[in-house]
Image (cartoon, rainbow, N blue to C red):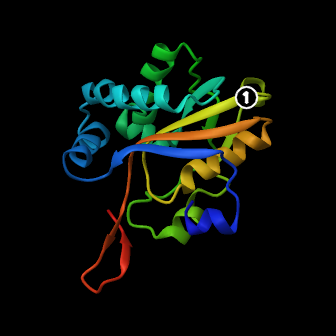
Amino acid sequence: LCSHCCQKSPPYRAIRSWALYQGTLREAIHSLKYKHDIALAESLAVHLIEMYNDLRWPVDLITAVPLGSKRALERGYNQAAMLARPLGLYTRIPFSPRALRRTRETDSQVRLGPVERHANVRDAFTANASLVHGKVVLVIDDVTTTGATIESCAHALRNAGAVDVYGLTVARAGRQVSETGQLADAR
């Protein structure tokens, strides 16, 4: 458990990531998100499927972190949903892109620190109670750094009656030592 989770229990059961957000994987995720290389989604989803099979979480519904309407229009697709859909097809667990909705536009998290990331996405999502009530929900995203986005999604899902929430991402930003010897978030 991270120090944040030790101080305050998160609204999700667990978040797991397949690999560190660096090198070739980082380039692949950037290509998927910003260069419209959507064929990468299925290749990356294979790793989520393998991980999910190992974890054996008792999930009833799969959803993806939703984009804001502005970003969805700019990009034309939701990369998290493109990762989630193959997982749902493979596992035969229903995938619902409508289980979560972003209620307001948020700033890009890329240049924000941990405190700003949590504030940026706080109360930014709402869940569809008719889809999630009484269910264990798996939230898929491409990258997690502080867990703020999945935490905010989990709050919305819990408020709508979800029994439990798990998070699964392709990559996790690691910790690295800066030139001054301080731990810093990898970007």
Residue depicted at 57% across the width and 30% down the height: 63
x and y percent of residue 36 in the render? 26, 34
Which of these two is toward me, 134 or 122?
134
Amino acid type at circle 1 is: Val
Which of these two is toward me, 45 or 54?
54
Indicate whether 105 appears above or below 185: above
Residue depicted at 72% across the width and 24% down the height: 131
Q: Is residue 115 visible?
A: yes
Which of these two is toward me, 144 or 38?
144
x and y percent of residue 38 in the render? 28, 28
Residue depicted at 47% across the width and 14% down the height: 89
x and y percent of residue 19 in the render? 34, 46
Indicate whether 155 appears above or below 134: below
Residue bearing the label numbered 1: 132
Q: Is disc 1 surrounded by few (<14), some (14 to 19) or many (20+) residues within 10 Å?
A: many
Looking at the image, residue 156 sits to the left or right of residue 75; the answer is right
Quarter of the rendering containing residue 48: top left
Say which quadrant the N terminus sits in: bottom right
Say which quadrant the C terminus sits in: bottom left
State how many labels appear.
1
Looking at the image, residue 42 sits to the left or right of residue 95; the answer is left
Which of these two is toward me, 187 or 102?
187
Q: Is residue 82 visible?
A: no
Residue depicted at 26% across the width and 29% down the height: 40
x and y percent of residue 140 in the render? 50, 36
Quick one: SS at disc 1? helix
